[in-house]
């Protein structure tokens, strides 16, 4: 129920963007992009709540992963509304989490506990915070150079690689030292 409400909220906000601004929510990063981020994060919270109530077995978790991936990829590929992309992403993550929980039952997990995936999980906040500014920097640079950025597998791979590099640097040079400093300050205050 909460996930349905969250997706409906994203769809309603996207409709408002279309009617009032004449563009979709995905085209609004600098102006009012906070509404996209906040509403999509609400979908993630709703998926987390749903994860606690659903008891998926290994097979249903796998089906949820496939359904989520299909919805997210098709929605992104066909430039459908942000709400459907968010729904697909939420189902994908929900299924992956359930699949890892059911690992003892099936003997097969998702690999999310692999060292590389754990490392990416550590970088996830930096990835989340930096993905839009990095895309906007690419877009602005392309505008200055007079070259539009074609959206294809090569540019996606290049942008993802740069995002991972910048996120790793931000994580190790800013996030981890800040976390240690905050923990140290808390210990001294006790």
Image (cartoon, helix red, strand yellow):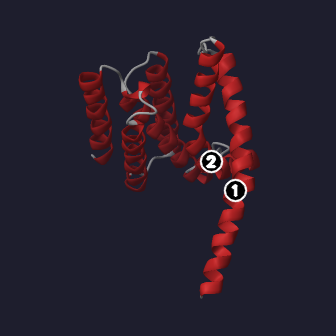
Q: Nearer the viewer, mark 2 or mark 1?
A: 1
Q: Residue 187 at x, y = what percent?
A: 64, 83
Residue at 60%, 85% (x, y): give it: 189
Q: Residue at x 51, y 48 (%)?
A: 98
Measured along the vertical axis of the image, is residue 67 above or below residue 1? Answer: above
Residue 49 visible here:
yes
Instruction: Look at the image and tell me in which quarter the C terminus lies.
Output: bottom right
Residue 126, numbered label: 2
Assess disc 2: are there few (<14), some (14-19) or many (≥20) residues with their C-alpha within 10 Å of its C-alpha.
many
In screen coordinates, is 44 left or right of 101? left
Q: Residue 109 appears at what percent x and percent y?
A: 64, 45
Label 1 sits on a secondary structure element that is helix
In the image, farthest residue toward the bottom? 190
Residue 133 x/y as whole percent? 57, 36
Position above or below: 151 against 187: above
Q: Residues within 10 Å of mark 1 (few under 14, many from 20)?
A: few
Residue position marked by numbered label 1 in the rendering: 174
* Of callouts 2 and 1, the N-terminal one: 2
Residue 143 in the image: above or below residue 71: above
What whole-number distance in Å separates the C-alpha atoms at marks 2 and 1?
Answer: 10 Å
Residue nearer the viewer, 175 or 74: 175
């Amino acid at each position: 129920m909460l996930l349905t409400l969250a997706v409906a909220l994203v769809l309603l906000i996207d409709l408002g963007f279309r009617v009032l601004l004449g563009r979709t929510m995905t085209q609004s990063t600098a102006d009012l992009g906070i509404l996209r981020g906040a509403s999509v994060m609400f979908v993630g919270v709703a998926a987390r709540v749903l994860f606690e109530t659903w008891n998926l077995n290994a097979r249903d978790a796998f089906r949820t992963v496939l359904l989520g991936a299909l919805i997210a990829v098709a929605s992104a590929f066909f430039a459908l509304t942000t709400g459907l992309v968010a729904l697909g992403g939420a189902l994908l993550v929900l299924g992956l989490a359930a699949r890892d929980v059911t690992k003892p039952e099936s003997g097969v997990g998702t690999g999310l506990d692999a060292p590389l995936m754990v490392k990416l999980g550590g970088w996830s906040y930096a990835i989340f915070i930096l993905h839009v500014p990095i895309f906007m920097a690419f877009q602005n640079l392309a505008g200055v150079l007079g070259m539009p950025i074609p959206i294809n597998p090569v540019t996606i791979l290049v942008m993802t690689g740069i995002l991972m590099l910048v996120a790793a640097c931000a994580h190790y040079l800013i996030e981890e030292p800040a976390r240690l400093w905050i923990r140290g300050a808390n210990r001294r205050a006790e």
